[in-house]
Amino acid sequence: MAKKPVALDGLLNTESRPTDTGIPQRGAGQGAAQDKKPAKRPGEKRLTLALDGETYKRLRLHAAETDQTHQAILEAALAEYLKRTNA
């Protein structure tokens, strides 16, 4: 005897709105994913950088010890390098 097919009709109501329970739901806010992105500064360009494990570890430790971001440290180092090389 063959099994009766399972009907899932009526389980999802795509025409109604969820009831507001007053409890914030994950992803419910407008632009929730965009809130995590850092603000882009005028004229800013993005760059991906790969470091070996030891250099990355040293960068992280230095950033924590000096209460700076990786971004701030790398920008200062690059600016100093470009200044020294007259680039």
Image (cartoon, helix red, strand yellow):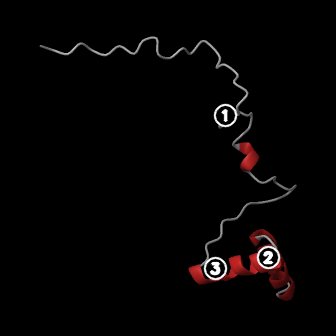
Q: Which residue is mark 3?
A: 57
Q: CA distance from mark 1 to mark 2?
A: 37 Å
User: Badge 2 is on which residue?
Assistant: 73
Taking the spot 82% from the left edge, 81% from the top edge, the residue there is 82
Dividing the image into 4 quarters, which one contains the N terminus?
top left
Q: Which mark is nearer the camera, 1 or 2?
A: 1
Residue type at tag 3 = Lys
Q: Residue furthest bottom?
A: 84
Q: Answer with the quarter of the image where residue 43 lies.
A: bottom right
User: Could you tell me how many numbered marks the image carries?
Assistant: 3
- The alpha-carbon separation of the residues under discs 3 and 1 comes to 36 Å
Residue 35: x and y in percent read 75, 45
Residue at 66%, 34% in the rendered image:
25
Is 36 on the left or on the right of 40, as rendered? left
Q: Is residue 68 above or below residue 1?
A: below
Name the amino acid type tagged 2. Ile
First in sequence, mark 1 or 2: give its number: 1
Left or right placement of residue 41 versus residue 20 in this view:
right
In the displayed structure, 71 sits above or below 52; it is: above
User: What residue is disc 1 on?
Assistant: 25
Q: Amino acid at mark 1?
A: Gln
Label 3 sits on a secondary structure element that is helix
- CB-based contact (under 8 Å), mark 3 and mark 1: no
Q: Residue 11 placed where, x, y %? A: 47, 16
State the CA–CA distance, disc 2 to disc 3.
14 Å
Mark 1 nearby-residue class (10 Å; few <14, some 14–19, many ≥20): few
